[in-house]
Amino acid sequence: MSDTLLSTNAMPMGQAKSVPQRRRRSLAHSKWPVLVLFLPPALLLFSVLVILPMGEAAWYSFFNWNGYGTPTQWVGWRNYELIFRNGAFTQALINNGLIVVASICLQVPLALWLATMISSRIKGALFFRLIFFLPYVLADVAAGMIWRFVYDGDFGLVGGIARFLGFDAPFWLADRDVAMYAILGVVVWKYFGFHMMLFIAGLQSIDKSVLEAADIDGATGFQKFRLVTLPLLGSTVRLSVFFAVVGSLQLFDMIMPLTGGGPSNSTQTMVTFLYNFGVTRMQVGFGSAVGVVLFVICVTLAFSYKRVFMRHD
């Protein structure tokens, strides 16, 4: 050990400084085989499965095309003009906005409240975590089919409760003024468990000594939550809101078995609008334009949110 130290100290200053540089160069050279081996397949898959379809969708959006053969009828920006003049697409934008608001104002606070209730190691906490997380495990299509039966006025739970109380059985999913709010309830029920688990993970990462210090200072439960817990959960809250916003813009699987976008297009979202007006009607050019608009909206919101609210996370 002493000989090593003496030999290191006896090195000329220039040679001693060059040792870390040689090590960095050797590490950089050692990474090249890994990059050469794994990067090209990943780039190839990403290009074939993501970049190429996006480019094709953007190209097809300038054609009036039914999906068969080669697109030849160039229409320019006409598909985009038709989108923003379509009342159903306007309703879809409004519905996506309602889902975003419900997710942020109802789903995330409910998840945070339940997480604070069951994050501590109380008796039965694991059981309640399982029960609250179970809806998220269900497939979206299965959840939509379950709630379609629940909302059914003839045979469902809601109709049975209404008749038991002496009221006429409601048909919420058939009422254009109520159907979207019924779907919002299902959305909150379906996804709050995911956000709850995020908050539980964040709460368990908080240093317990900080909360103990707040107890010693005489802080109440609400004061500890507002002044200690919530600020320390800032990054988790921002991440949860980010997932809620992006997921709300892509909602599709659960709405199709519930209403299919009806009645009278009152429950359309941007993705169901793309499917109903583009895919099922064989208007691939128009549907591609809808996909491009949805992509631009999602990417703009995602990058703007991360740049404004998550730049320090």
Image: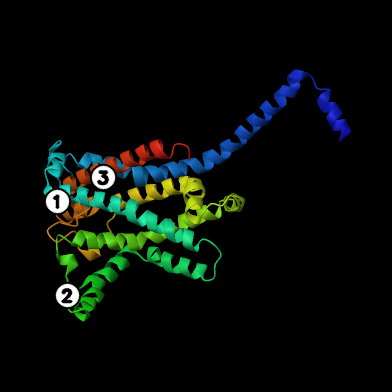
- Looking at this view, is 239 or 42 the one in front? 239
Residue 144: % across, % down: 28, 66
Q: CA distance from mark 1 to mark 2?
A: 29 Å
Q: Dots 1 and 2: beta carbons under 8 Å?
A: no
Residue 84: % across, % down: 15, 42
Report the side of 50 relative to 13 (left or right): left
Circle 2 Cα neighbour tier, 10 Å, few/some/many (<14 / 14–19 / ≥20): many
Q: Is residue 260 visible?
A: no
Which residue does the image show at 20% across and 76% down from the upper left? Answer: 162
Circle 1 Cα neighbour tier, 10 Å, few/some/many (<14 / 14–19 / ≥20): many
Q: Amino acid at mark 1?
A: Ala
Total labels drawn: 3
Label 2, secondary structure: give it: loop
Circle 2 residue: 169
Q: Residue furthest front?
A: 218
The N terminus sits in image quarter: top right
- Looking at this view, is 33 or 304 the one in front? 304
Circle 3 residue: 294
Task: State which tag comes first along the sequence, 1 or 3.
Answer: 1
120 to 287, vertically: above or below: below
Q: CA distance from mark 2 to mark 3?
A: 38 Å
Task: State which tag comes first along the sequence, 1 or 2.
Answer: 1
Report the side of 251 relative to 214 (left or right): left
Circle 1 residue: 88
Task: State which tag comes first along the sequence, 2 or 3.
Answer: 2
Q: Amino acid at mark 3?
A: Leu
> Which quadrant holds residue 188?
bottom left
